[in-house]
Amino acid sequence: MRIVFMGTPEFAVPCLERLLNDGHQVTLVVTQADKPKGRGHRLQPTPVKACAEAHGVEVFQPEGLRGDEAYRRIEGENPDLIVVTAYGRILPQRILEIPRCGCINVHASLLPKYRGAAPIQWAVINGESESGVTTMQMNTGLDTGDMLLKRTCPIFPDMTAGELHDRLAQEGAQVLSDTLKALEAGALRPQKQEEAASSYAPMLDKSLGRIDWTLPASVLHNRVRGLSPWPSVTVFCQGKPLKLHRTAVGEEYTDVAPGTIVKENPLTIACGGGTTLLLQEIQAEGTRRMTAEEYLCGHPLPVGSRLESDKE
């Protein structure tokens, strides 16, 4: 098929690569603008742009999609299909109407649950036991189009959002391949989304990384793994930030105040309801990520001291 592909982050790369490997004619890749990264703030291409250029596919980076420039550029490709994977913007109606087979989106949730910008992270934060990928026929709503195919993926109790992201990126490529084969065979059976079962996954921001030790350890554990690797949960030890990368729910009960260190090995923190949280991998400002045991070798944290939610 003659395809225009629209995507931006690393999650979308396996889908683009699968389209090319399946022999589809990807004539144009549309991605968002390059952004500055690192200490030098040098402009870096989006992961999808880097992939497209490596395969010799032309790249288009419009400032927006509502102007005539974007419409004419995409229409000029005369695509059979537009495939969208984490592009980052809603497509206007006139672009949706360009391809004869419409526009198909690859979304990282089991729709209609977790529509929106951060479905992977919110599924983990909310303690879901499974997630997945859904392909859908796009409309002008936010992930509200008719569902096409799904693939389910378990979320293990200690799986982080970053780990689930990598798994779903590969699952997304496979379900996209299956969807296009079914489309070509005339075997797709679109299914309406049930509004009563829908939920929303809003964009993440750093404020979510503020921890409330009065919550149960299971809730905090899900928050830590759901915000890993970004924006991450941050606590403060003697006024200095400490990122929490990996935790576990403790088995012992405690009656000390939430946020108090109750044991140094393993590093155990009191939480709400008498529960405890084990800190397994942490990172101090300006240092590498390390195990709690490694950190304690040079930074002792005595039993009875506190990890604060905010800078003192």
Image (spheres, helix red, strand yellow):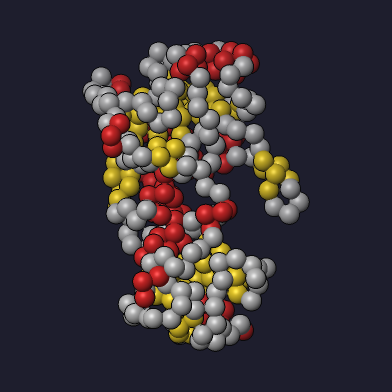
State left or right for residue 125 relative to residue 49. left
Q: Residue furthest right?
A: 40
State left or right for residue 195 relative to residue 159. left
- The one nearer the camera, 281 or 219, is 219
Q: Is residue 104 above or below residue 100?
A: below
Q: Is residue 49 above or below residue 140?
A: below
Give the percent coordinates (x, y) of residue 301: 56, 83
User: Which quadrant of the rendered structure holds the N terminus?
Assistant: top left
- The one nearer the camera, 157 or 105, is 157
Residue under the point 40% across and 40% down: 200
Residue under the point 44% across and 56% down: 226
Residue under the point 56% across and 64% down: 234
Residue under the point 74% across and 48% down: 41
User: Which quadrant of the rendered structure holds the C terminus?
Assistant: bottom right
Give the percent coordinates (x, y) of residue 297: 57, 85
Q: Is residue 81 above or below residue 162?
A: above
